Amino acid sequence: MNGSIADPKAVRRTILRNLRSALLELGSATKAELSDRLGVSFPTVSKFLGQMEKAGELLPVQLDDSSGGRRANRYSYNPEVMLGLALFLERTETSYIVFNCAGEVKDQGHAASVLTADITDFDALIAALVNKHPQISAVSVGVPAAVNNGRLIYIPEYEQFHDLDLKAHCEQRFQLPTVIENDMNAAVYGYYMARHQRSKLQPSLVYLYFGQNGPGSGIMLDGNIMRGSSFFSGEVSFVPLYDQYNFGEAMRASHPHPRSPDGDLSVDAVARLIAVFAAVLNPHGVILSRHEANEGLLAQLEAASQAYIPREHLPAFILGDWEQDYLYGLQGLSLDLMLSREAGGN
């Protein structure tokens, strides 16, 4: 027998996600409009909208003007029915945002670092936020770690979290769908979502950050996050650039170079790393945080990179807002979980 039988639960989640996304994007729609837009039968759309209405997901909208027959009901989505929680863990603090299905921020702030404590502090923070916002329906967590399906497989300097299945822990502890993502993967995803989500271009991008926990990168190829066979992609500290140093060691041992606003960057080491990315991946752009770099530094990196790679093969050099891109990426991951939930449940 050829083909495979579709998973009914996955089909349901896809239909629900597409209905919610369409209503949020359009503002309001009739059953016929949703059926045409999504390519789903009118009876199926009616069935799912009925379930969503019972769960409080739909808001009343006045009937459409009649064209001679019965006036069609128009539906809009209630963005407050579910809230998402996104938080990211850093050495000095933990940042979080709570937002509705339309992406509107309802709460945000900073708390003490849970990385320098233990899992009980992490649990206490999420419990406090869920207690404050009972409508939280999905959680996304960004970590300075290599992540294999929610398990922290490489998180140097925070041994108490090494090999912890943080996704399973959160879902068992709070009964909420959860996604755990590497910080740089979330950042490059957020940059892409903010600028390229609706464009025809599916770019290849590299996001470089030097940060509190050492250098890392997020890599996107043709619009898809690259994680690698063992989920170790982007750990650029290990790239051997010099006879005596890998990239991470070169950045720590470098002599003074032209300075960014917040510290030293070894221009030659970064230029060599960008040349490696250009030769292997040939990305459209390399993004550096405006908190670590400026236009002058980008110009220096572009000039220095040309010592290794012909200019026509170098990527564009771009300034990004790392924290904003990071949070936006985590928000997108959490929103995807929210929109895929069963009506009125998990």
Image: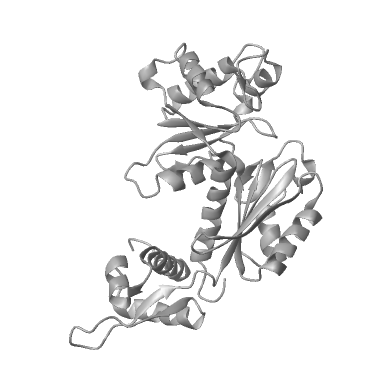
Q: Is 267 above or below relative to 324?
A: above
Q: In terms of image quadrants, where is residue 50?
A: bottom left
The residue located at (44%, 24%) in the rendering is 278
The residue located at (51%, 19%) in the rendering is 301
Measured from the top left, where is residue 293 in percent x and y? 57, 27
Measured from the top left, where is residue 79 in percent x and y? 50, 69
The residue located at (43%, 15%) in the rendering is 309
Q: Nearer the viewer, residue 150 or 58?
A: 58
Measured from the top left, where is residue 292 in percent x and y? 60, 29
Q: Quadrant of the N terminus?
A: bottom left
Q: In terms of image quadrants, where is residue 168?
A: bottom right
Measured from the top left, where is residue 113 in percent x and y? 76, 47
Residue 231 appears anywhere in the view: no
Q: Is 68 above or below relative to 320?
A: below
Residue 27 appears anywhere in the view: yes
Q: Quadrant of the C terminus?
A: bottom right
Q: How is the image coloured?
A: one colour
Residue 207 left/right relative to 93: left
Q: Is 98 above or below relative to 246?
A: below
The residue located at (36%, 71%) in the rendering is 28
Q: Nearer the viewer, residue 204 or 22?
A: 22
